[in-house]
Image (cartoon, rainbow, N blue to C red):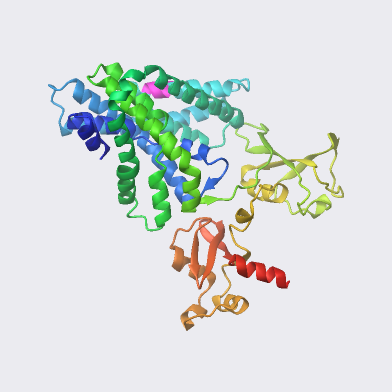
Amino acid sequence: LTGLMAAWLFDLSLMQGILVGAIVGSTDAAAVFSLLKGQSLNERVGSTLEIESGTNDPMAVFLTVTLIALLGTPDAEMGMNFLLKSFAMQFGVGTLIGLGGGWVLWSLINRVQLADGLYSILVLSGGVALFAFSNMLGGSGILSIYLVGLFIGNRPTRSRHSILNVLDGMTWLSQIVMFLVLGLLVTPSTLMDIALPALALAFGMILFARPLSVWLGLLPFRSFTTKERWFVSWVGLRGAVPIILAVFPMMAGLPNAQLYFNIAFFVVMVSLIVQGGSLMKVARLAQVTLPPTPTPISRTGIEIYPASEWEMFVYKLKEEKWCVGEPLKRLSMPEGTRITALFRKDALLHPSGSTVLEANDILCVLGQDKDLDSLSELFSEAPLAEDAARFFGDFFLEVGLSIAAVSDCYGIELGSEEERDMTLKQLAERELGAHPVLGDSFEWHDINWVVAEIDDHKVVKLGLCLPKTTLEEDISET
């Protein structure tokens, strides 16, 4: 769709228009999550954006490189067989090098004894080598390096935290350099001639091409609500990848290469300003965000042995936490975790079971990533506004309860005997389908019900949200 619009707006051939569409088609999920400012999206929407961003980059590179080859050698015979062979080579070799190279690099990290600062260098150099090797064999280097990161990031890895910190810094540096390149290669005097058609193309992508493709793509997935579909349609932010792809035609010496780059400039800028600037408001309107989750003020990996998953979580207690004034022995800590140190007014204390916690105490807790949610709920607290505090409901109910018992307590008039025989679990399955996520909601008998807890992709607790007027009346009566 974008290619057709580009061909019409800029008087290009169909092949040239599709090349423009391939260049500007890649989205950037990382930009979406960074602009949410600490808020998280529900699992269904967040995972969709991550998968989309991870998979459309290799496809965008494949289409761009293939179309440049077709436009650069118009006399060569490049039919469907060439396209299928190129596709199989790019994705087949890219997948094999990515998974195989990821396993080799992961094994090397965990088996070789190096200075702590060298593991991140090993990952960087190994990743660059695998990227180049995949390209040399005719595969997709982008796909390979994505799979390498996916493989290593989801396995116990030595010096994991230092590697992630270095890669995070390199990511920011790379994006800064790419946007600097964007500014250096743009000639302002040539922008005015294409400003109107480029703006029309950018808004055409935002308002027409992406919504249509998203709605068609999500048709088989009935669990997506209408608001979630509109949100995914809106957040197709363009980031660093279109900038790099726009340089490819210039390096290949294609005619109109500067035009392609200028178009990419307008599309990226409009996307960042319009979609990025409105992202928070659109997320609130679509009701796809979750309240900020409690987190420690600091977390550090503990290298007890290679591939150790132990971490040190640091928490500062607030006055309103229930555990303030209680001895440590009364805390219900997750199994396998330990409080290793307690700081009070900059002084180190040696905690014991009889140690009474005070406000502003700083606790150092040894645990693993799987314990993070329980520990953070116990010791830390996210800053919640009034609406966020009531996000999951005013009262929480186990899904094993019968609807008849709930209706008697809350004065719900049931319409049939069938409803009285149902449990809340059956009600949630009927209203939300087989794949609910945390934060999903539905209205039943004029009451809003929210999925408040999920375990193994199954609803464990439902939150019951009373209307504000009803809640205020109950409080005043109390």
Q: Is residue 268 above or below residue 325?
A: above
Q: Position of residue 22 (x, y in %)?
A: 29, 32
**What residue sits 80% from the left and 55% below the top?**
330
* On-image quarter of the N terminus: top left
Decide if residue 246 is on the left or right side of residue 375: left
Nearer-the-camera pick, 189 or 8: 189
User: Does residue 355 appear in the picture of this structure?
Assistant: yes
Span of residues in magenta: 129-133
Q: Look at the image and say whether residue 191 sits in the magenta stretch.
A: no
Decide if residue 237 is on the left or right side of residue 205: right
Looking at the rendering, which quadrant does residue 347 occupy?
A: top right
Q: Is residue 376 above or below residue 192?
A: below
**What residue sits 42% from the left and 24% below the top?**
130
Nearer-the-camera pick, 173 or 77: 173
> What is the count of numbered marks?
0
**What residue sits 39% from the left and 52% below the top?**
229
Q: Which residue in the rendered view is the most extreme toward the bottom?
A: 417
Looking at the rendering, which quadrant does residue 16 occupy?
A: top left
Q: Look at the image and say whether residue 132 sits in the magenta stretch.
A: yes
Q: Position of residue 293 (x, y in %)?
A: 61, 47
Q: Position of residue 217 (x, y in %)?
A: 32, 49
Magenta portion: prevailing SS class: helix
User: Does residue 288 appear in the picture of this structure?
Assistant: no
Q: Is residue 344 above or below residue 134?
A: below
Q: Position of residue 127 (x, y in %)?
A: 46, 24
Decide if residue 445 is on the left or right side of residue 365: left
**What residue sits 73% from the left and 71% below the top?**
478
